[in-house]
Every structure is written in structure tokens, then in C-alpha cells.
Amino acid sequence: MRHLMSPLDLSVEELYDLLALANDIEQNPGKYAHACDGQKLATCFYEPSTRTRLSFEAAMLNLGGSVLGFASADSSSAAKGESVSDTIRVISCYADICAIRHPKEGAALVASSKSSIPVINAGDGGHQHPTQTLTDLLTIYSLKGRLNGLTIGLCGDLKFGRTVHSLIHALIRYSGIRFVLISPEELKIPSYIREDVLKRNNVPFTELERLEDAMPELDILYMTRVQKERFFNEEDYVRMKDFYILTKDKLTLAKEDMLVLHPLPRVNEISVEVDDDPRAVYFKQAQYGVYVRMALILTLLKWR
């Protein structure tokens, strides 16, 4: 039995197999409509989520399975003081696979150590968000046809953004990858990622403050929101939240085939006028999230 705590839990070969399966699911959905008949997915979400929780549920329902779980800590026995370890032991009696989101880093790993069913980390604090990374990789792979030889701009909250951290970890395994890290000083990439991940693996990167300076060279622009829930005070959040806004004017500086990705939810960091640009693929990205989670559920249940 295997769990998914990090994108690195999958080898490069396993990842390609997963993306190929997701592409086949997209092309032939009827072929998989009963693949999980009689099986149950538990969604244990200790913090709010729309896309991640609903895409997991849609994925399992598309596979013919069923779903049970809770959408917030207040609606679970966590409100009574039950530990994650005890909760997953109970959930293991009811379901065949579990997706867990928790505000504390490492909570999903604790759950996996006590679980008798596969556990998927659906986000743990500011640490990892592996299924969003799989979604990002599938989007890039499907629309660009490759995961190597790309210049990728990561813009916004690079300090607390777990989607950014997971994506960097995943992409450094491919050749010809270069990062442009675009953020204000207060939200720069954490030093452990700069030193232990990028520099240690000799991955070229540039750090900039102005989005306009980066645009002409990018193959991918990955926008993120400034996350209010990660700030300790309102004043810092208000000062940072409007630092970067992608507009149509800024897009005129970009390549014709650049892709704009965003893990969503969007607040105001991408103007709605950008939505009609063919390079804006963030809503398509959300659809790819269902396909890749279907592929992941199938894969982990097969490995059980």
C-alpha cells in the first residue's frame, strides 16, 4: 500500500504513467465510469476548500464510487478534541481511500502512519499540496507537450504558497527548467527552498520584484493569490494583497504561446479581462484536476 504525501513520492516514470492515464481518462471517460464501483473515498477537510474537495468528490463519482466525509473541522469530532491519528483509524473502517486537508504541516503524514487505507495529502498548511502539483503538471504536459526545457515564472506569495513549493520540488527533476521568482521582499521564496532545493540541484533561477520585467522570457506564468489566512495581522495582508495584478496590458509583453496558470481561488491578482485570452488556462487547469485525481485514485487503489 502507498500514500501520496509529496509529488516526490512518485518517480519520474510513475508520474509519466499517471499523466498518461489522466490523458486517457480525458479522452475516454466512459471506459472508467465503473472502475471504482462499490468503493468509497473519505474526504477529511479540516480547513475550507472548494476546488480540491469537490474535484476529489467529482473524481470518485466519475469512477463509479461513492464519497463520505466532512468539509470543516467544526463539523467533525476534531471539534471535540479527537486527534488526527484516531480519526484516520476510524475512517479506515469506513472507506477504501482518504483525502485529507489540514492547516498543520505534517498532519497528513501522521494520518498516513496510522492508516490502513491509502491517504492522499490534499494540502497541509504552507507545506505541500501534491495533487495541485499533479494538476499543474498535467496542464503543462497536455498543453505544452513536455515538462522539460521551460522557463517558469512564479508570481505572488512565494513564501506561504504551498502550491509553489510543491511545483518547484516536482519540476527540478526535469532538464532545462529555469525559474523566475517574482515577489515582494516580504513574500520571497523561503531560504530552505532557495538553498536546499534550487541551489543544491543547480537549477537556474532569478528573483525579481516587477512582473513586467519577467514577462517576455516566460513559457509559463504561475500566478498565486496573497493568502489572508497565512498572515498574522490584517495590516500586513492589506499592504501586500494588491502588489501584483495581471492585466491585458501586461500580457502584451508575453510570448504568444505563454500559458497563464493559477491554482485558484482568484481574488484580484488576475483581471477578469484576461479570462478571454487563449493563454489564460486556469479554468481548464481546474478541469484537469479532476482527471489527474481520477488517475491518482485508480493508481493508489491498484497499489493497495
Image (cartoon, rainbow, N blue to C red):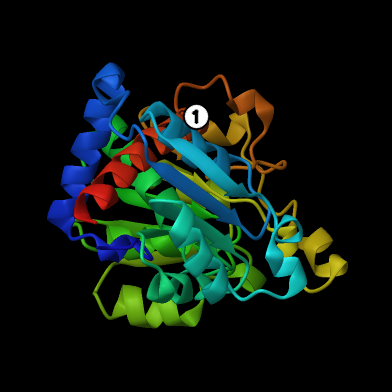
Residue 70: percent from the left, percent from the top?
64, 51
Q: Quadrant of residue 265?
A: top right
How many labels, in total?
Answer: 1
Residue 193 image point, x, y percent: 42, 76
Q: Is residue 302 left or right of residue 285?
A: left
Reply above or below: 162 against 62. below
Q: Quadrant of the N terminus?
A: bottom left
Q: Residue furthest front?
A: 93
List the residue tagged with mark 1. 280
Under circle 1, the secondary element is loop
Question: Which amino acid is tagged 1?
Answer: Ala
Q: Residue at x 38, y 28 (%)?
A: 64
Residue 175 visible in the snapshot: no
Query: Could you tell me residue 173's position as x and y percent?
Result: 21, 62
Residue 77, by quadrant, is bottom right
Q: Nearer the viewer, residue 88 or 227?
A: 88
Instruction: Assign the C terminus to one quadrant of the image.
Output: bottom left
Is residue 263 toward the left or the right of residue 244 in the image? left
In terms of depth relative to the viewer, which is nearer, 59 or 179?
59
**Residue 114: x percent and y percent?**
42, 75
